[in-house]
Image (cartoon, rainbow, N blue to C red):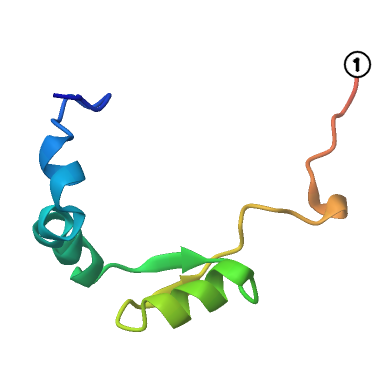
Protein backbone atom coordinates (compact mmCIF):
# COMPACT_ATOMS: atom_id res chain seq x y z
CA UNK A 1 0.00 0.00 0.00
CA UNK A 2 1.48 3.39 -0.98
CA UNK A 3 2.17 5.82 1.86
CA UNK A 4 2.16 9.60 1.53
CA UNK A 5 5.05 11.62 2.99
CA UNK A 6 2.76 12.54 5.90
CA UNK A 7 2.42 8.87 6.82
CA UNK A 8 -1.18 8.46 5.68
CA UNK A 9 -2.17 5.51 3.52
CA UNK A 10 -3.08 6.48 -0.04
CA UNK A 11 -5.15 3.37 -0.78
CA UNK A 12 -8.53 4.75 0.36
CA UNK A 13 -7.82 8.03 -1.45
CA UNK A 14 -6.92 6.32 -4.72
CA UNK A 15 -9.93 3.97 -4.52
CA UNK A 16 -12.59 6.69 -4.20
CA UNK A 17 -11.35 10.27 -4.02
CA UNK A 18 -14.77 11.86 -3.47
CA UNK A 19 -15.66 9.49 -0.65
CA UNK A 20 -12.29 10.15 0.98
CA UNK A 21 -12.15 13.94 0.54
CA UNK A 22 -15.72 14.86 1.52
CA UNK A 23 -15.33 14.22 5.26
CA UNK A 24 -11.85 15.81 5.27
CA UNK A 25 -12.01 18.83 2.93
CA UNK A 26 -15.67 19.84 3.13
CA UNK A 27 -15.49 20.95 6.80
CA UNK A 28 -12.30 22.90 6.07
CA UNK A 29 -13.88 24.66 3.08
CA UNK A 30 -17.05 25.50 5.01
CA UNK A 31 -15.23 26.78 8.11
CA UNK A 32 -15.55 30.54 8.45
CA UNK A 33 -12.14 32.19 8.63
CA UNK A 34 -10.95 35.66 7.72
CA UNK A 35 -8.92 35.69 4.51
CA UNK A 36 -6.18 38.33 4.42
CA UNK A 37 -5.62 39.81 0.97
CA UNK A 38 -3.89 42.74 -0.70
CA UNK A 39 -6.41 45.34 -1.94
CA UNK A 40 -7.17 45.01 -5.64
CA UNK A 41 -5.08 41.83 -6.00
CA UNK A 42 -5.89 38.68 -7.92
CA UNK A 43 -5.99 36.91 -4.55
CA UNK A 44 -8.76 39.22 -3.38
CA UNK A 45 -10.85 38.61 -6.50
CA UNK A 46 -10.29 34.84 -6.24
CA UNK A 47 -11.17 34.73 -2.54
CA UNK A 48 -14.38 36.71 -3.04
CA UNK A 49 -15.41 34.52 -5.97
CA UNK A 50 -14.36 31.12 -4.61
CA UNK A 51 -15.19 31.63 -0.93
CA UNK A 52 -18.11 34.10 -0.79
CA UNK A 53 -19.00 33.00 2.76
CA UNK A 54 -15.51 33.88 4.06
CA UNK A 55 -14.91 37.45 5.25
CA UNK A 56 -11.91 39.15 3.64
CA UNK A 57 -9.66 41.74 5.25
CA UNK A 58 -7.37 43.98 3.24
CA UNK A 59 -3.78 44.18 4.47
CA UNK A 60 -0.83 46.29 3.37
CA UNK A 61 1.59 43.50 2.60
CA UNK A 62 4.40 45.01 4.65
CA UNK A 63 5.70 47.21 1.85
CA UNK A 64 6.90 50.72 2.71
CA UNK A 65 7.40 53.74 0.48
CA UNK A 66 11.07 54.39 -0.33
CA UNK A 67 11.32 57.69 1.56
CA UNK A 68 10.04 56.26 4.84
CA UNK A 69 12.93 53.94 5.76
CA UNK A 70 15.01 54.74 8.82
CA UNK A 71 18.18 56.44 7.76
CA UNK A 72 21.53 55.02 8.83
CA UNK A 73 23.30 57.80 10.80
CA UNK A 74 26.70 56.54 9.60
CA UNK A 75 29.92 56.44 11.62
CA UNK A 76 30.14 58.79 14.56
55 or 63, nearer to the observer: 55
Disc 1: which residue: 75
Q: Is residue 50 above or below residue 68?
A: below
Q: Quadrant of residue 12?
A: top left
Q: Quadrant of residue 64?
A: bottom right
Mark 1 element type = loop
Which residue is drawn at the image coordinates 41% and 76% (left, top)? 50
Which residue is drawn at the image coordinates 19% and 53% (left, top)? 17
Q: Is residue 71 above or below residue 67?
A: above
Q: Is residue 17 above or below residue 35?
A: above
- Dot 1 crowding, Cα within 10 Å, few <14, some 14–19, many 20+: few
Q: Quick one: which residue is furthest to the right in this view?
A: 75
Q: Please indicate whether residue 24 sits to the left or right of residue 63 in the image.
A: left
Q: Position of residue 70 (x, y in %)?
A: 78, 41
> Which image quarter is the N terminus in?
top left
22 or 11, nearer to the observer: 11
Q: Position of residue 29 (x, y in %)?
A: 24, 66
In this rendering, the count of numbered labels is 1
> Which image quarter is the C terminus in?
top right
Q: Please indicate whether residue 55 sits to the left or right of residue 59 in the image.
A: left
Q: Position of residue 40 (x, y in %)?
A: 65, 76
Amino acid sequence: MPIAPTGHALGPYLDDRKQYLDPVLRPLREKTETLYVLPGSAAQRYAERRFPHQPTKEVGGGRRPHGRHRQDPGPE
